[in-house]
Image (tube, helix red, strand yellow):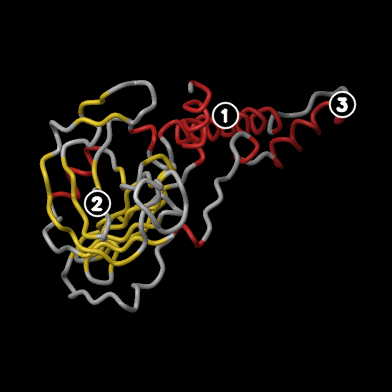
């Protein structure tokens, strides 16, 4: 179990989250957001490169001594400083076009100022739309098993275009995940946004285990961090459209 948590934590360091930033006057700009530890490592690496370059520049610009200079001793250092890149310290994260939401589904009809939600299971991402524009993206967890839901208890998150049935206070709810830890209070976070999917008990909710986000771990629901769920709840409403896709 500890090994699994460690691997999930290491994987989160390489994760690049796409966020949308409000620049004002209706302008939204897409940016990459890295793990805080990743940013610290990058800053330290850049600072190290800057100091190394400065030291090398200082000594290389000083007047040469009368004795011959041994170029064989300085060339390797100069070559390393010239060729060194930040990827030598930390691998460049790979972001494919699949990480971004595609066109609005043709079967979906929404007004220009209407909020709706799109969940991409492959990317573990929940996108909040307003009309045709993405306003924000969130990291989520989905069902343990891939593919469209086929039967109750198959631990799959259903695919399709659904609507919100109700928004329920889940702060006092409990659940036994049958993992030996017994009944967990707060397993659903503060809210349960129940969906009309044709299956019982499918919804968007919070979690007591934020480390599980970005993985296939749920029994079919969509998990979010409790803070981000509170944010989503501010714009969620009954009959709000929710698209779930692979």
Camera-side mark, 1 or 3 = 1
Instruction: Examine the rendered structure and indicate whether residue 130 appears above or below residue 49.
Output: below
108 on left or right of 102 = left
Per the image, the residue denoted by label 2 is: 200
User: Considering the numbered disc 1 on the image, is that residue within a helix, a strand or a loop?
Assistant: helix
3D distance between C-alphas at marks 1 and 3: 25 Å
Task: Provide residue 72's location: percent of width, then percent of height.
Answer: 87, 29
Mark 1 and mark 2 residues within 8 Å of each other at the beta carbon: no
User: Considering the numbered disc 3 on the image, is that residue within a helix, a strand or a loop?
Assistant: loop
Quarter occupied by residue 55:
top right
Mark 2 and mark 3 residues within 8 Å of each other at the beta carbon: no
Task: Provide residue 52's location: percent of width, then percent of height.
Answer: 62, 29
Task: Provide residue 133's location: percent of width, then percent of height.
Answer: 28, 67
Per the image, the residue denoted by label 3 is: 70
3D distance between C-alphas at marks 1 and 2: 55 Å
Indicate which disc residue 48 carries.
1
Residue for point 46% across, 54% down = 122
* Along the line of sight, the residue nearer the viewer: 67 or 154: 154
Residue for point 33% across, 31% down = 177
107 on left or right of 12 = left
């Amino acid at each position: 179990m500890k090994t699994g948590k460690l691997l999930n934590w290491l994987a989160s360091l390489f994760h690049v989250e796409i966020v949308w930033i409000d620049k004002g006057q209706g302008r939204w700009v897409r940016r990459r957001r890295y793990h805080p530890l990743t940013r610290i490592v990058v800053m330290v690496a850049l600072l190290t490169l800057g100091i190394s370059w400065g030291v090398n520049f200082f000594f290389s610009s000083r007047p040469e001594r009368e004795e011959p200079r041994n170029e064989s001793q300085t060339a390797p250092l100069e070559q390393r400083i010239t060729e060194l890149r930040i990827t030598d310290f930390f691998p460049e994260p790979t972001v494919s076009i699949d990480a971004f939401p595609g066109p609005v589904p043709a079967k979906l009809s929404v007004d220009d100022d209407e909020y709706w939600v799109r969940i991409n299971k492959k990317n573990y991402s929940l996108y909040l739309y307003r009309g045709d524009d993405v306003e924000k993206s969130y990291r989520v967890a989905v069902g343990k098993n891939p593919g469209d839901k086929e039967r109750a208890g198959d631990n799959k998150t259903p695919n399709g275009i659904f609507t919100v049935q109700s928004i329920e206070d889940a702060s006092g709810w409990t659940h036994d995940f049958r993992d030996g830890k017994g009944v967990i209070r707060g397993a659903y976070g503060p809210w349960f946004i129940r969906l009309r999917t044709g299956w019982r008990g499918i919804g968007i909710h919070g979690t007591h285990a934020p480390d599980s986000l970005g993985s296939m771990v749920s029994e079919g629901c969509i998990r979010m961090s409790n803070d981000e769920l509170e944010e989503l709840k501010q714009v969620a409403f009954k009959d709000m459209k929710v698209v779930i896709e692979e």
